[in-house]
Image (spheres, rainbow, N blue to C red):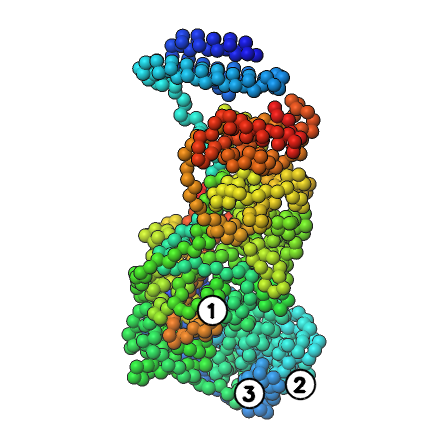
Amino acid sequence: MKITYNWLKEFIDFNWTVKELSDKLTFSGIEVEAVEPLSGGDHLLDLEITPNRPDCLSLLGIARDIRALAGGKITQPDCTVAEKGQPIDQLAKLSIEDGAGCPRYLARVITGVKIAESPGWLKTKIEKIGLRSINNVADVTNLVMHELGHPLHAFDYDKLADHTIVVRRAKPNENFTTLDGVERKLTAENLVIADAKRPVALAGIMGGLESEISDHTKNVLLESAYFEPNLIRKGSRALGLKTEASYRFERGADPLILKKAADRAAKLIAELAGGQVAAGVLDVAKTEFPEYRRLTLRPEKASSLLGMDIPVQRTVEILNALELKAKISGEIIEVHIPSFRSDIEREVDLIEEVGRIFGYDNLPGDRIEPWAVPAVKRPKDIFIAGIAKIMTGLGFSEHYGLTLIDPGQLEALDLSPAFPSQPAVELVNPISSDQSALRTILLPGLLEAAGQNLNNGLDGVRLFEMGKIFRPQKTTPDEGLRLGALLCGRAAGQFWDAKPRAADFFDIKGALQFLLDSLGLAEAEFSAEKIPALHPGRSALVRVDKKILGCCGELDPSAADKLGLKERIYYLEIDLELLMELSGLKQSRYRELPKYPSIKRDLALDLPAQTECRRVAELIGLLAGGELESVSLFDLYQGKQIEQGRKSMAFSLVYRAADRTLTDAEVSGIHQKVVEGLKGKLQANIR
Amino acid sequence: MKDKLAIIGAEAEAKISGCRSLAELEALRVLYLGRKGELTELLKSVSSLPPEERPSFGAATNQLKVRIGQLLDARKAGLSSAERKSQHSQETVDITLPGRQPFAGHRHPLSQLLEEISDIFHGMGFTVAEGPDVDTAWNNFDALNTPESHPSRDPQDTFYLDKENSLLLRTHTSTVQIRTMLSQPPPVRIIAPGRCYRRDAIDASHMPVFHQCEGLYVDKKASLADFKGILNYFVHQLLGEKVKVRFRPHFFPFTEPSVEYDFSCLFCGGKGCRVCKQSGWLEISGAGMVDPNVFNNVGYDPEIYQGFAWGLGLERVAMLRYGINDIRLFYQGDMRFLEQF
Ligand SMILES: [Zn+2]
């Protein structure tokens, strides 16, 4: 809401500068968002009034807060009206058909007015706060709305059929043209003010074009009404029509200010436009409005909640200055809440009133309860932090992908059987189709980031993300936690005396093995598996203890093409919750260190090209028996030097017995058995 | 082949005994025993022999390897230690050449910030609590005393998963406060970090997905002054002793009294600059004493228990702390950005 400094001073005498005023208001709950100098030394203040304070959508309301802060006297606007005209009930009729929507309606009539430009003082006031001056009647209603906070509406009395006001719901498909010239189709949801024939105003929102005050208007019917806030809010929203009036009514007007506001406006209209105010008012109330509600405040509770002691006398003073009539009664304070403070319903609301005016700057800032025991970190947080350390140590930087993704891309990015990407949970009201579903896998976000980085000219990408995925269920989706990691382009470990190398499958597998080994899960099993999103010949399913932990491999090159990714992309995704569970089960146990020396033998084999490394190693283990300590591949060759369809693999075997020193002859015997076994079982030749 | 072994053996013996420096000796070691040394090369040609000769040839080669090794060691011991020292002094490298450095990965700035925040609050006895991103409208709005007509419920502002608007993407992590209070009796001291969602189009200061780390403290005497004390301690730990805190009264449905809290400007120290729009202060978030209606909704007796809750936007704090002016950077995975943290 906009007010001017000088206008506010007409309501309350205070000695603050504009700067002091805006600070004081801001720190008591009425935020001054902007101050703008005006001509003549005046200033425009733009206030943010929180939705619980409709009473502050007026100069009088703000003056009350200032009185509570600084003391001083409030000057009420002059509302004495001379009723020189004939009795109003001879001039107009009023009925309320929808008492729930309009609990009270009050009208005055002013006859014989002359519509003209407003006098200078009124024009200036209205224009300073950014409104357009219209005429002497409309400007008065705007002026009174800003003074007292209550929206009024002036009708051209002679345009009202039968000089009758009926407050009712609109009939289905009833048409009505509002002041702004827009013809609107109404429904039974709309509360209207009608004359004997048709609607003349959208209640609490906007008047009608036909009954508007014009240059020819002779007589005025002035409306001062109270409308039910929710109905006005819904009506305003349904029509997409927000006005100064609807803004106030939907926050809750004061049902007991109707006469005062009508009096003030009628007085000013008679003064500025001539004419006579009809005697009396039409006033129909469908509800009883008590003058005040009773609440009690325990100073002890206030001090406990706020953590500071406010003297009881000051508490009472603050409440009274806010017109929350307070008096001490033993240990408590009894308070009468007036009708314009519908926001105050409970003791705690009173505590806020006292606290904000007393000032939160007075709160001690050095009070911390001495808690004896610091909280313990959750195992999950420790685990996640540990994974992050490993991944960053492996050269991956952490990415935060969006949770909202394009469901259209999921079919091409399926990670079944590890992680089916479809179906996904879809939003009812997405902003756009490319953010309309909850992610089921982390892959799309990491791919998008990889593409961006490559477009930025980077020659390699290494990113990981730890985040939630969502699997649809009957009601609430199931939320899982995943680790995804992607690499492409230049491989790690570059050095100035070594040739640059492009990343390949074994970089992503190696990263995953390193991670698993770090967690004591080195025996994870990688098996070749067709995974739709991955390369048909370069993808693996990863299992630990027979449970599927995730998958890794090269992104299917045709999927990469579709996404415009020029590099070969390597990717892994694993279930973090399962990983945490599995690593938690691993209990390390000490094995005695070897006492006797080992003997190392190399074994070079020529094998059919499709023979899996794991199969060879397993077979060697089986053939060698208990004296074989380890077997590891140290060379692999496939190419010109070897027959087509075959490959050469060289293993290094370490033999050791736990209870004696093995002799050369013993080892040679075992080794020979291994060699013979491999020849027969794998069509291997020894090289 | 065996002859070749004999020739190599004799030659090696002569060269080693005639060797005058350690460097020369090392060169000989490489020549004979290195990965590409003569003996290794010789072993590679073993496949050209008839299979029955291979084992004996292999054994002979190994024997020679051992012998040359012994000769080298003996000669090395023979060279004077002074000579070795002078040799060492010549073995210089350009130590300014880059080392063999693996790629270094970087943790996301929001993760780093969250860990720091958690550590500070752990020290004050707060534990981390979590909840699902998809939650009920009851946990997100009703339990938090948000009226049916509140604009935040509007499908313009909140993502819904069903036509009845009963399931949604949480708009704040206050849902975790509700879940925690429903699941345990007081006292409660938690921080609740997590992703939140609002139906905002993406621009430099808005993302439909963002992070909060809210906090809640409920006990018999937890007061607004306690909150101020905790907030002061927190901000001093996180951003430095010089940063000040202030409250401005405000309105939220879930707290009463409610405040917005500000930090003194990190950029100008409160003197006024472009970032703080000359005010010297930066708006951070909202807070307040938990509304009695919220306590009633979770079955806590507001006559016995009281407490405070506060919001904190992780992106907001990270942007202020690191001087980041575009929130989108947090979600683009741009390695040039991530590597700065
Ligand atoms: Zn500043």
Contact between labelled residues 1 and 3, with CB atoms less than 8 Å apart = no
Instruction: Say whether mark 2 and mark 3 are on the same chain.
Output: yes
From the image, tell me which residue sits under label 2: A196
Name the residue at 55% across, 17% down.
Answer: B56
Residue B252 screen position, x and y as percent: 46, 68
Residue B323 screen position, x and y as percent: 44, 47
A630 or A138, which is in the foreground?
A630
Q: Is residue B314 above or below residue A518?
A: below
Q: Amino acid at mark 1?
A: Leu
Disc 3 chain ID: A
Q: Amino acid at mark 3?
A: Lys
Q: Is residue A320 above or below residue A383?
A: below
For disc 3, the neighbor class at 10 Å (few under 14, some 14 to 19, many from 20) is some
Foreground: disc 3 or disc 2: 3
Residue A167 screen position, x and y as percent: 61, 83
A686 or B328, which is in the foreground?
A686
Instruction: Say whether mark 1 and mark 2 are on the same chain.
Output: no
For disc 2, the neighbor class at 10 Å (few under 14, some 14 to 19, many from 20) is some
Disc 1 chain ID: B
Residue B185 screen position, x and y as percent: 42, 69
The answer to whether residue A402 is visible is yes
On residue A286, which mark appears?
3
